[in-house]
Image: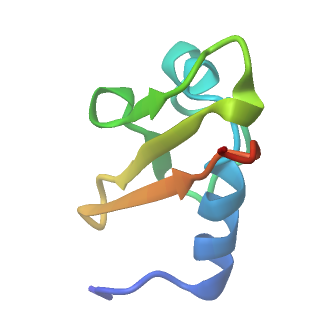
Amino acid sequence: MSSTISALTAAQLSQAACIPLTSWQANPTGAAPLPAGRQAVPSLSNYGGTATDPDATVQVTAFANESTRQLVFTFKGSDKFAT
């Protein structure tokens, strides 16, 4: 069993991190294309900011692969400049 993820898997999860958490809560396996065997874990994910302004939202989304027993946490920073 590999203890690391491939560069492609990392890139796919990084892209998936930009999907609003509310979408993952509604559909953990299909809010966006995910690497095989992965799904979002909304109970381990969270966001700060406002749900109505996704550019202002900082969020952490967890993705799990039960067959490899891997858990990956992704981070999306805000697109807004803080003053």
Taking the view exactly as shown, the residue that stands out farthest to the front is 83
Q: Quadrant of residue 54?
A: top right
Question: Vertically, is 35 above or below 45?
Answer: below
Q: Position of residue 18 (x, y in %)?
A: 69, 45
In percent of the image, x 44 and y 45: which residue is there? 60
Total numbered labels: 0
Judged left or right of residue 6, residue 62 is left
Q: Quadrant of the C terminus?
A: top right
Q: Position of residue 71 (x, y in %)?
A: 31, 59
Observer-nearest of 62 and 65: 62
In percent of the image, x 42 and y 49: which residue is there? 63
Q: Position of residue 23 (x, y in %)?
A: 63, 21
Q: Quadrant of residue 4?
A: bottom left
In percent of the image, x 46 and y 31: which residue is there? 47
In percent of the image, x 62 and y 86: which residue is there? 7
Q: Position of residue 74 (x, y in %)?
A: 48, 57
Judged left or right of residue 9, residue 25 is left
Observer-nearest of 36 and 40: 40
Q: How is the image coloured?
A: rainbow
